[in-house]
Amino acid sequence: MTLRGLRVVALIGVAAAAIAATDYRGYLSQTVDLTTILPPAPLKGEIRYEADRKIFKQTRAMLNTPRGQLATSDVPSSVIDVMKDFSCAAGVTLSPETAPATYRLLANANADTAHANNAAKDHWQRLRPFLIDKGPVCESKEELAKSYDYPSGHTTRGWTFGLVLTDAEPDRATPILTRARAYGESRIVCGAHNMSAVEAGRLGATVTMQTVRATVAYQTDLAAARQELAAARANPALAPAVAGCSTEAALTAKSILAGLK
């Protein structure tokens, strides 16, 4: 095959993957209205508003640390990217190739929690922290400013993954939910979101997942994912790198909020 032919095949493969990703539309027929459940976005003059500002300022120094490097590596947020981020916590290398049933489960649950989160974000339209106070962030300010702060979409996705993977691997609940907590906190380290937005992302994902879990389709896909992950964890070839996992565990064991005054 010619070089041009190889490029065409590669482009077709990328397009097919993109189309496949859009096939996952979620388990719910109706979006959960988080605007009636979550606390409203903090307003200027309120205690939560000032707490957000203080935490944003104090955590800017974390960017130039190993924790800041982890936060930056947590920025890519496709379902495939976040599966990779949770591999150490899950005890198995996660990808659409190694765990297709788990990918399907995560992608559908993510669609539901993302829909609910995005509607709430557009409702409150709260500015991101670097638009209120000056400070460095770990990604493009121009791109971040195109969407709002509250609730955090990254946190919603990370906490969704934590809940779903805990359903599938309850014996791994502690490392999985520790990673999910840290994934949300990476947005504070990055300066992309306020603390209140991270907290709201977790709560919003939890609320939506309560409804998702009640669907027959979710429970069916969950059963398939449980079997798949059990088999994958029994395969030494799919074990994540020990050194990388040890480093990640050390960075995420303690909340970034511990010790802030």
Image (tube, rainbow, N blue to C red):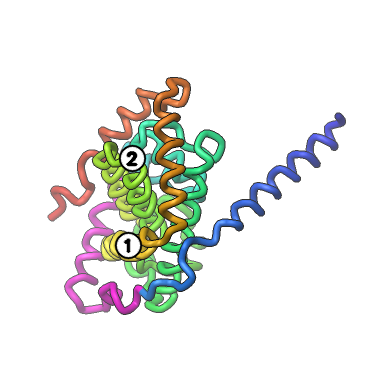
Which residue appears at 27% of the width and 78% of the height? Answer: 43
Mark 2 element type: loop
Please report the bounds of the magenta region as a residue range: 34-63
* Image quadrant where one finds the N terminus: top right
Q: Which residue is under mark 2?
A: 169
Q: Which residue is under mark 1?
A: 210
CA gap, disc 2 and disc 1: 17 Å
Which residue appears at 60% of the width and 57% of the height? Answer: 23
Mark 1 element type: helix
Which residue appears at 17% of the width and 73% of the height? Answer: 47
Position of 21 relative to 208 (above/below): above
Position of 237 relative to 255 (above/below): above
User: Which is nearer the eye, 101 or 180?
Assistant: 101
Q: Looking at numbered disc 1 in the image, what kind of residue is underneath it?
A: Gln
Q: Looking at numbered disc 2 in the image, what kind of residue is underneath it?
A: Glu
Position of 85 relative to 143 (above/below): above
Horizontal and vertical percent position of residue 126: 37, 73
